[in-house]
Amino acid sequence: MQLMTEVLENELKNAVEVKDENALHRYVSMMVEQKNKDEKHDREHELFREAVQNMNAKTEAIIARTDAIVVEMRGGFASVDKRFSMMTTLVSICFIVIGTMITLFQIFG
């Protein structure tokens, strides 16, 4: 930073008539400092941008996993629903058989 300040000061001294060397030094120092701040800001902005992109990728992966889990759960619910229907049918048949047997025992027995 110091080297850049000195180079810019010398270039400006050669290019224009300098009335106050202290003012020139302050001006060049402020320019170099501002440039460094801008570069730092650009680096921080790029890091922030990369962090947001990483978060976006992670969020998309989580959504994809969640969608896969939902599809799997729907399949599980379908099998449970099918089993429940079979059990309900079996219980209904058993009640019909028991009712028929009771009726037959009362008639013939």
Image: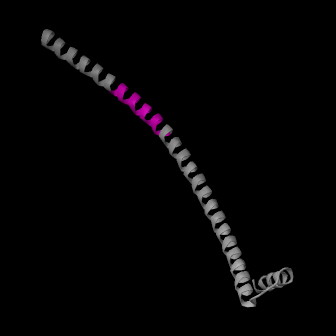
Q: From the viewer's perspective, is 30 left or right of 72?
A: right
In the figure, residue 39 lies in which quadrant?
bottom right
Residue 95 in percent (x, y) is at 24, 21
Q: Say whether residue 73 is magenta.
A: yes
| 94 w.r.t. 62: above or below | above
In the figure, residue 43 lies in which quadrant?
bottom right
Q: Nearer the viewer, residue 13 or 32?
A: 13
- Rendered residue at 59%/58% (across/down): 52
Q: Nearer the viewer, residue 102 or 7?
A: 7
Residue 4 in percent (x, y) is at 79, 82
Q: From the viewer's perspective, is 59 left or right of 41?
A: left
Residue 79 in percent (x, y) is at 44, 32
In the figure, residue 105 lies in which quadrant?
top left
- Rendered residue at 63%/60% (across/down): 49
- Rendered residue at 64%/60% (across/down): 50
Q: Which of 13 and 54 is in front in this view?
A: 13
Q: Indicate how the structure is coloured in the image.
A: one colour
Q: From the viewer's perspective, is 2 left or right of 97?
A: right
Residue 24 in percent (x, y) is at 74, 85
Q: From the viewer's perspective, is 33 left or right of 8?
A: left
Q: Quadrant of the N terminus?
A: bottom right
Q: Give the range drawn in magenta.
A: 72-87
